[in-house]
Structures are given as structure tokens and as C-alpha cells.
Image: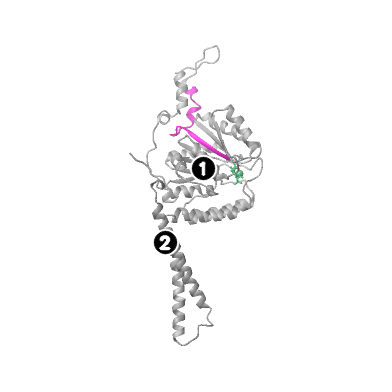
Amino acid sequence: MDAQNKPDKKPIQNNTSKNTGQNPQNNQQNKKTPGRRYTGRRRRYYPRSQQNSQSKQFKTSFKKISIVIPLYNEEESVHPLTNEIKKALNPLGLNYEVIFVDDGSTDDSLKKIKEICNSDKKFRFVSFRKNYGKSAALQVGFKYVSGDAVITMDADLQDDPKEIPNLLKKLDEGYDLCSGWKKKRFDPVVKKLSSKFFNFVTRVLTGIKIHDFNCGLKAYKRDVVRNIKIYGELHRYIPVLANWQGFTVTEIPVQHHPRRYGKTKFGISRFFKGFVDLITVIFSTRYIKRPMHFFGFFGALAFLAGFIILGYLTVWWIQGHPLSNRPMLFLGMLLIIVGVQLSAVGLLGEMLVRSSTDDKEYVIKEKR
Ligand code: UDP
Ligand code: MG
């Protein structure tokens, strides 16, 4: 793990649930039935250890977990997914909410979501009028979360909610973001290979040592989702955006499943879009506040090369040779012009940055 990804050793904040090893919901239950539990007409006594055996299984410092699920035309998966989430989380006694973000589905997804939300208050939804894409769906979902830890997962049953406690454990260790790593992946070969390539390039260019940047299953502390801005298709690079804002990032291997219903919403275009987005991410994280370092560097390089070429040709001309048969002259001129232009773009960028610097862009960790 890269040093910059390591969490600072800050103590995890204690709260009621941490002190007692249970969540507030269970505490309430305990208040109602101190030491005894009644079933039916006959009074039966269960020892305290037996009563709480289930809720003691998972301890976390988070009071509430918000699960954000972006979905686009996943009508067959909505009910099975809901059941899987309930099956995985209810026995742990976790206080959680689920926010479905319907990304303009044209099938019966919204109808199914509404059925679920009507029957269980833990489930809520936001619905887009049209399809804006996964990044937009996540960004809007993040706006509505009320938990202090946030989980994102895909709706297509490829991500396993049983992994949620493992992700939360990493946040409790001090990390701000824990990404899933689909170590054994159930996807078509082309997708696996292109994804391997992108993960490799991203790892090299960003220095963030994780294997799977674009896993749908991730856990975040609330601060992270309040501070990252994802649009277009930047959801692929959330760990990079978070890390560049100073948040600590890690990953754990997670169980992955083949897609059970429907088909993937990202075709071969993912390859090209992914590449353009990678350039956007690198530029916007590393150079957005200092454009001159980027444009100025390449501008200076081009200018220098042009200068050397023209210098050489000048000496050649002084020695009495004609320049009319030297195509290098055009190359030298071109390089000088490009160099000046790139530097000018860098300078303009610097001026824009200077006039638009805003306190809101700096992520504050603590204040009194
Ligand atoms: N998705 C979405 N909006 C879109 C495309 C996809 O909300 O425009 C959702 C989709 O329904 C799924 C998740 O994003 O819940 C991941 O999509 P998919 O399974 O197609 O991606 P893959 O697993 O092939 O990378
Ligand atoms: Mg999928």
C-alpha cells in the first residue's frame, strides 16, 4: 500500500453503538425488555446472552449506513436484490437505509422500486426523468444520504451485500474509502482485459496502488461523498478523485457474480470513453490548480526543440548554404509557434485559476 493511501492513526470516534457493541436500534429493544423476552401467552425466560446473540455479531462505530444503488432498466433484479440486502443486513442489527436512484429506466424498474419503498420505510428512491448515466445517479444519491457511512453497489446482482460488513470494518480501521476488488471476476473476456489495462494505466499514472478502480461496491465515510464531484463517466475513477482530495483509500477482495438478468449498460464505447475520462481525471486532479505546469512544460519543450533546430540552420546559412532545400526549417518554425501557443494557454489557465479560487474547493478535515 502506498504511503499516501494509509490512514492517519486517528482514534475512531466512540458513540453509543461503539460503547455497547450494538446499534441504537438494539439498545431501544433492550430498554423495552430488560433481561426478559415474552413470546405468546406463556412467559418464557431466555438468558441475556441468547437474546442478543445475533446483534452482537457485528460492531461498527457508524450509527447509520446509507446504501446508494444506481439502476437503469434492472426490473428483474430489484426484488431479488432487496431480499439479498435484507438477508445480509437485518441479522446484523445494522441501522441502514437504501436509496435507489432510478436513472430514467424505461422498463418496470420504478414500479418495482415503489412497491418495495411502500412496504419498507428503510427503502427510499429518487427517479430521473431521463437517463443521465451512472455518475449522475451516484452524485444525486449521495445528496440524499443521511448515514455517516455510505455504501454504493450495482443493482444487477453482481455485487454481494454480504461484503458490506467487511467494507465497513476497513472504514472503522481509519480509511476514508474502501473499494471492492473483483479478484475473481465473472464478466466477458474483453471486458476483463480492457479493465485490467485501465486499472494498470490508472495505477501507474496516479500512484494509487489498488487493483480495481471501477468496482460498483464501495464504502465511504460521509465526508468523502459530500466532497467529491462526479459527472460524465467519472464514477470509474472515484478512488482517484477522493485520494487527490486527501482521503485515504484502500481495497479488499469481494465476491462477484455473473449478471443474472438483462445485459451490461456499457458497451465497447467504455474503452474510448474510459481513456478520455482518464485524461480528464489526471488533468483535473493533478494540474487543475496549476495549468502552467502542464502546458508550460510541453510548451517549453517544443520551444526549446524549435530553437535548437533554427539555431543549427542559422549556422548552416551563415556558412553559405541555402535553406530552401531544408524541410527542417518548417519543423523548427512549427515547434516554436506551438511552444509559444502552449505557454500562452498555460498562462491564460493560470489567470483563470487565480481569479476563481474559492475556499469551498478546499476540503476541511476539522474545525472548531
Ligand atoms: N447504470 C445506471 N445508469 C446507466 C448505466 C448503468 O444507473 O446509464 C447502473 C446499472 O443499472 C447497474 C450499474 O449502473 O446497476 C452498473 O451497470 P452495469 O452492470 O451495466 O455495468 P458493468 O457491470 O457492465 O460494468
Ligand atoms: Mg454489472
Quarter-of-image position of residue 84:
top right
Dividing the image into four equal quarters, which quarter contains ligand 1? top right
Amino acid of disc 1: Gln
Whether residue 60 is in magenta: the answer is yes
**Could you say which quadrant of the image residue 297 lies in?**
bottom left
Tell me, yes or no, if residue 194 can be seen here: yes
Residue 48, numbered label: none
User: Residue at (44%, 83%) from the top-left corner?
Assistant: 315
Q: Is residue 236 left or right of residue 343?
A: right
In the rendered image, residue 205 lying in the magenta stretch gets the answer no
Q: Is residue 79 shown to the viewer in this render?
A: no
User: What is the x, y in percent for residue 132?
Assistant: 58, 45
For marks 1 and 2, the one nearer the N-term is: 1
Q: Position of residue 195 (x, y in %)?
A: 58, 52
Q: Amino acid at mark 2?
A: Leu
Which element carries disc 1, helix, strand or loop?
A: helix
Q: Residue furthest left?
A: 368
**Residue with the mark numbered 2:** 347
Check disc 1 and report the residue beneath it. 139
Residue drawn at x 39%, y 55% is 354
- Mark in the foreground, 1 or 2: 2
- Which stretch did the figure color magenta? 49-70
Residues 126 and 352: in front is: 352
